[in-house]
Amino acid sequence: MNALTESLADLQRIAIFRALQLGDMLCSVPALRALRRACPHAHIALVGLPWARNFVDRYAPLLDELIEFPGAIGFPEQAETDEHLDAFCDAMRTRRLDLAIQLHGSGGVANDIVERWGARLNAGFIQPGEAEHGGVFIPWPERLPEPARYDALMRALGSEASNLDLDIPLRASDLLECEALIDAYEIDTSRLILVHAGAQLLSRRWPVERFAHAAIALEADGWQIAITGSPGEAALTARLAAMLGDRAIDLTGKTSLGALAALVGRARLVVCNDTGVSHIAAATRSPSVVIASGSDTHRWAPLDQALHLVLADYPPCRPCAFRECPYGHPCALAIGVDKVIEAARAQLARFNLHSHREPLGSAYGK
């Protein structure tokens, strides 16, 4: 690792490469907070996916701009093509960046792309055996939880250690939208359990039939069940809704990110896969049961292991990066319905607060 030869506070133009989805972005928030504290006057741009424009708007105290990454070979979040990469890197060089930070992952081709932006200083992670890069690069911290990894890089750059808690700023409009949803669907937040059966990768999904059986048992206990999901998960959630019938409210596609976060903050429990909603629950301090299939739970599990109970099995093939499991999904099938019901009941008994809970927003400023 090379030391930064000048103060972070003196840097004016910074770009961060992290072209990933919601859960990944939420896990980077502690590092973004640390960077903003160290560089209060810098213009900080996120190089990310097109959807992240909403993320940048929501985290305006931390980020000033979204620069849309056009995609590249080896980056499966978008079409894997280098067709637009040269022109993109040429455009990035015209920005005359003071600092470019590779916050996308462990290194390799991501470092090569960031170096093509021509910043005065580069920072990021390197994989074992990777050639050294000029700038501030640290070995990929294999065993650290996800938020701590990126905070470690910020500390290597010279920022102060950050609180690793996730947070999600909520606006007045988010709270109003949430209240309108509660009124429209006659949601009783004192009894509300949110069930989120989706995940971007099929390998990360617990079987939807098992979600249904768990939800039926919890509804029989007297809890109100609401299904959440994105419009892209409508086919999956429709199956779940059909199994539950009038036992559940289907909110698929009916919430913005902010309203969903506000509703999660009001729920008594979230039952979900290891996906973006699990990180929203962490950011709003909402009790959860997370059925984690395929993922590296040491890396991705919420840090508060009491508030967020993670259920996982560890066959030899885990962790994996498969979109769809080629081995019959043993890690998911090992988690039985009874185990999830038991975990949910335990969380509800431990954290069932009978007073009205307001969702937490953000306490930082630019």
Image (cartoon, rainbow, N blue to C red):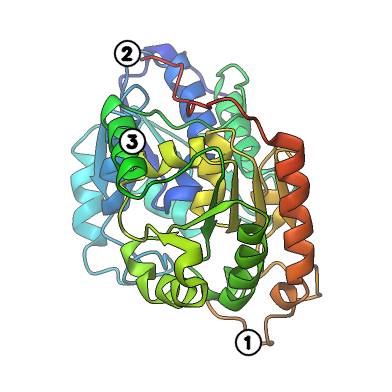
Q: Is residue 45 visible?
A: no
Report helix, strand or loop for mark 2. loop
Which residue is tagged 3? Answer: 179
Which residue is tagged 2? Answer: 41
Q: Which numbered disc, 3 or 1, marks the residue that appears first in the sequence?
A: 3
Compared across the picture, whether 334 is left or right of 146 comes to right
Q: Is residue 30 above or below residue 308?
A: above
Q: Residue at x 63, y 54 (%)?
A: 127
Residue 4 x, y percent position in the rendering? 52, 23
Q: Nearer the viewer, mark 3 or mark 1?
A: 3
Residue 201 x, y percent position in the rendering? 51, 70
Say the numbered circle drawn on residue 326.
1
Q: Which numbered disc, 3 or 2, marks the residue that appears first in the sequence?
A: 2
Q: Nearer the viewer, residue 231 or 48?
A: 231
Q: Residue at x 50, y 36 (%)?
A: 266
Q: Is residue 230 visible?
A: yes
Compared across the picture, whether 278 is left or right of 54 comes to right
Query: Counting other residues with Cα less than 10 Å from the Cα at mark 2, is it few (<14), some (14-19), or many (20 or more)?
Result: some
Q: In which quadrant is the C terminus drawn?
A: top left
- Give yes or no for contact between labels 3 and 2 (Cβ–Cβ under 8 Å): no
Report helix, strand or loop for mark 1. loop
Q: Nearer the viewer, residue 234 or 221?
A: 221
